[in-house]
Image (cartoon, rainbow, N blue to C red):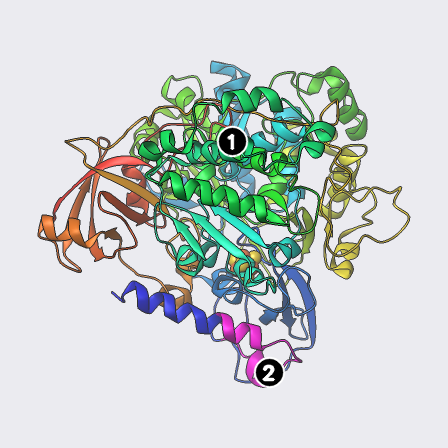
Amino acid sequence: MPSLSAIRSSLAPALVKVRAHTGPMTEELVRHPADHGLGLPQLPGRIKPASTVKSVCGFCATGCSLDIHLDADGRALNLSADPAYPVNLGMACPKGWEALTPLAATDRATTPLLRDPATGRLAPVSWPVALDTFTTRFKAIQAAHGDHSIAFLSTGQIPTEEMAFVGALFKFGMGGLHCDSNTRQCMATAHVAYKQSFGFDAPPYTYQDFEESDVLVFVGSNPAIAHPIMWQRVQMNKNTPEIIVLDPRRTETAMCATRHIALNPKSDLTLLYAIAHVLHHEGWIKRDYIDAHTSGYDDFAAFLKPYAPLAAEAVTGVSAETIRHLAEIIARGKAVSFWWTMGVNQGYESTRTAQALINLALMTGNLGRPGTGANSITGQCNAMGSRLYANATSLFGGRDFANPTHRTEIADILGIAPAHIPSESSLAYDQIIDAIDAGKIKGLWVIATNTAHSWINSSRFAALRDKLDFLIVQDMYATTETALMADLVLPAAGWGEKEGFFINSERRLGAIHKVARAPGQALSDFKIFQLIAQAWGCADRFAKWTSPAAAFQLIKEFSRGRPCDITGIRDHAHLTASGGIQWPHPDTATAEPARERRLFADGKFFTPDQRARFLFDSPRPNPEPACADYPFVLNTGRGSSAQWHTGSRTNKSDVLRKLAPRSLYVEINPADAARLGLVFNDRALISSRRGQLEANVVITATVRPGHVFMPMHFDAVNRLTHPSYDPHSRQPNYKSCAVQINHGD
Ligand code: SF4
């Protein structure tokens, strides 16, 4: 196994190479090493492209634009990073460079597969048989157990048109109610935090803010690995900024920061309140801004009384002097931006932690100006699309299922009876799992996600498989951990094989385009939803959903008059020609939108009184702290910039596999390793109250004594994680559970 430092250093040249290529294509650069197999042509050597199409990357929510170079038949030869796009400015990370390779994987699902009861194996069937089985089995479950006994779990990885279509089909056509997506694991906290504080799920920033701050505060965020192009934008900041990283681990970002605060795990809420305490008591606040644009500050100030720096020392492990100094840096900053990612979102008190950052921005007047903001960095390429248009827990466009006016608005747009729209919201992901356990949900449809690997306390999901009467998996690959459990597999086209749009972290809509043919009988998810509507017998309610282009026009209407209004965007071609467009862009706009826009410059928020709210709660006890039996705190997260989530795509690339360890590893502090008698590459047995696994030992001082870290890209890791959830967002707590470590075999 290569060492972590070798891996990390190997990533830097990859980025440099990408950044260097901002000029015209050369013959050398158009040759792609992985063009082979299904859907993509074999390249005889150096081939000049016949044309180029711009498409937004389908991995992370940075939303880089890639130039896809095509042959004369319109098929992708290779790609390069778009030098003109305002997001990535000619850069791409290793995943972006390898974006075409997973399409050519040999384990693509190329035909529907149905489990044969005689052999117990998945066997190929035709699409008509698959669709008939889908409807027959799901309708039988509904007849036996009620309409709400079927559910789906979807993704932040498919285009907005597709996630909107399946949300409409399931709830307005199939009579279903309970559905959620893997954005629950990723961005539910940011969604709820913004909605409660600002009145709408509205990340306020633009990526230019990375370059314009003079103080950047990253909390539970490691963009150097998880969002490398955003980190490159930080590197372009000419203000010699103060970069503060709050993270228990000395991450790659922490190593590059001007200040790394290695606070105790899950003590961030207390630390942020302590910083707010100092700001308030020193008078380092923007009283004019607070009075004009916020509500609840006086209650917040009273609440802060017990969070004096000295009192916070024991909980946070951060000295009172350091806490005061952090507050002073923030107070002195002219343009302070606060950034958070999964270290905040994936916690048991995550919403209030995110809002503690929002509170800091509000009380110091750091919103709506260049270089400022309380800014959540999104995970998946279309998590923001899912938050606004998945039609799962909120009705299209951030509406409320319980609101009859909202239901009528959507029914009118779709030309269906309002009675077809449910008046209650869906169960959240964890509650759907509980309902399976309770025997209330008997049919599950998993779309472009890999629950068996990624869901917290994963052994439980595996055990629940037998409680389902029928499991359908719709995916590019028939080999994911979840697809291998399925009764029926529907083969789906992937990114690059279909049309649509994503919304990135900074609210920018970007179009994706078809540059390769899906293999075998695989179909776009959009086409599969159309076929299911026909097979189910409800196609008449979806007559307007004729294509992704038509669905885009419907989504525009869903947005009309909402904070996320995009009625001024004509079509996908408008997005591509414009370099992406940030919402809002209503059709009342008199000019093309600027390339970079932020929200709340006028201090008006989306709450009824147009004021942002200070929201806060006392910190809650850690549901599973370290103890005598389980003395280590396990943190999980991104392993490298070459890996993506469960690896179903990135593991298909030889290039990406070489940039990351192939075997599961655990990072442990040198003092702990010495005490346990472990040396580098020993096998360690890691156990929690829920399961155990073996991993190679990596000894590194990046984790503190008593802490260990493991990458989330290996399926065994979630056998250990603790099934606890934030009460507001119901996002799982992947960042802290108690484990013990022993010698493995
Ligand atoms: Fe950009 Fe993210 Fe794609 Fe990398 S994975 S190229 S950072 S969008």
From the viewer's perspective, is residue 612 above or below residue 503? Answer: above
Give amino acid for label 2: Ile
Give the tally of numbered discs: 2
Residue 483 lies, in percent from the top left, at 40, 43
Which one is in front, 218 or 125?
Answer: 218
In which quadrant is the N terminus drawn?
A: bottom left
Q: Which residue is mark 1?
A: 152
Q: Which residues are magenta?
A: 15-32
Q: Is residue 18 magenta?
A: yes
Q: Which mark is residue 47?
A: 2
Give amino acid for label 1: Phe
- Asked which secondary structure carries label 1, the reply is strand
Residue 590 lies, in percent from the top left, at 91, 48
The answer to which image quadrant residue 551 occupies is top right
Instruction: Give the crowd class for mark 1: few <14, some 14-19, many >=20 residues within 10 Å.
Output: many
From the viewer's perspective, is residue 495 above or below residue 126? Answer: below
- Asked which secondary structure carries label 2, the reply is loop
Instruction: Give the crowd class for mark 2: few <14, some 14-19, many >=20 residues within 10 Å.
Output: some
Ligand 1 rendered quadrant:
bottom right
Q: Is residue 269 left or right of residue 611?
A: left
**What is the distance, in whole Å, between disc 1 and disc 2 at their CAs?**
44 Å
What residue appears at the point 48 percent right and 22 percent down from the top-left corner? Answer: 617
Q: If you read the primary sequence from the N terminus, does the residue marked by circle 1 or circle 2 appear first?
A: 2
What residue appears at the point 43 percent right and 56 percent down from the top-left corner? Answer: 253
Q: Is residue 721 left or right of residue 231?
A: left
